[in-house]
Image (tube, grey):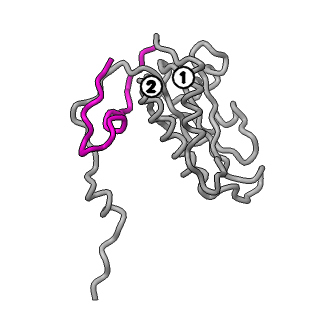
Amino acid sequence: MRRDPEPLGGIHPLLAGRFSPSRFDPAAGVDDDSLGLLLEAARWAPSAGNSQPWGFFASRPGEPDHGRVVRHLAPSSARWARDAGLLVVTLAHRHVDDTPLLYSEFADYDLGQAVAHLTLQAQAMGLAARQFRAFDLEGLTEELRPNPGWAIVSMIALGQAAEEPAKDRDRRSVTDLLSAPWSPPDTP
């Protein structure tokens, strides 16, 4: 069992201890109660107009749907994602049915909020989560056939990490977070 590091600059230990593992313990599953708690956390995420435009497709090793998901992983993610106790495909409700009319222009942002809630709940439960997009999007969409208006966005591998977080995790500075997106003002 790994210990969470001390909070950095006063941030909560759940945030300070979060990391994306590159290896999962294949013997550690994610049971129904844990899956329910993860989805409950996502359910309570905020969304524009309370539209809650997110959905999930969850599969575990040994279940028939797991093979439907795993076969579409890119080689780079298949190396570690196959061993996760749970793979979750994330979806956003972007359009009204199969029209170009937007259901929510904030669907992807709101899905990100739900995934963040799910990720922190996983951390609180002693599970690790790694979000990724290294899979065949077209093939997975054809395989799962989401309802009209819904789009697959990413995947999350969840389970017991089979490694410790790196001691020195490189993160951008707070100053850079405030200045990077802006161009310097024009000077006359």
Residue at left offset 27%, top offset 54%: 174
Q: Which residue is mark 2?
A: 125
| Mark 2 neighbour density, 10 Å: few (under 14) some (14–19) many (20 or more) | few
What is the x, y in percent for residue 77? Answer: 46, 29
- Residue 111 located within the stretch drawn in magenta: no
At mark 1, the secondary structure is helix
Query: Residue under circle 1?
Result: 34
Q: Which residue is pictured at 70% across the width and 55% down the height?
A: 103
Q: Please identify the quadrant where the N terminus is shown.
A: top left
Secondary structure mostly taken by the magenta-highlighted segment of the chain: loop
Q: Which region of the structure is painted magenta? A: 1-26
Q: Which mark is residue 54?
A: none
Q: Quadrant of the C terminus?
A: bottom left
Residue 117, image x and y in percent?
50, 39
Q: Residue 58 or 7: which is nearer the viewer?
A: 7
Q: Residue at position x 58%, y 19% from top?
A: 60
**CB under 8 Å between discs 2 and 1:** yes
The first of marks 2 and 1 along the sequence is: 1
Indicate the amino acid at tag 2.
Answer: Met
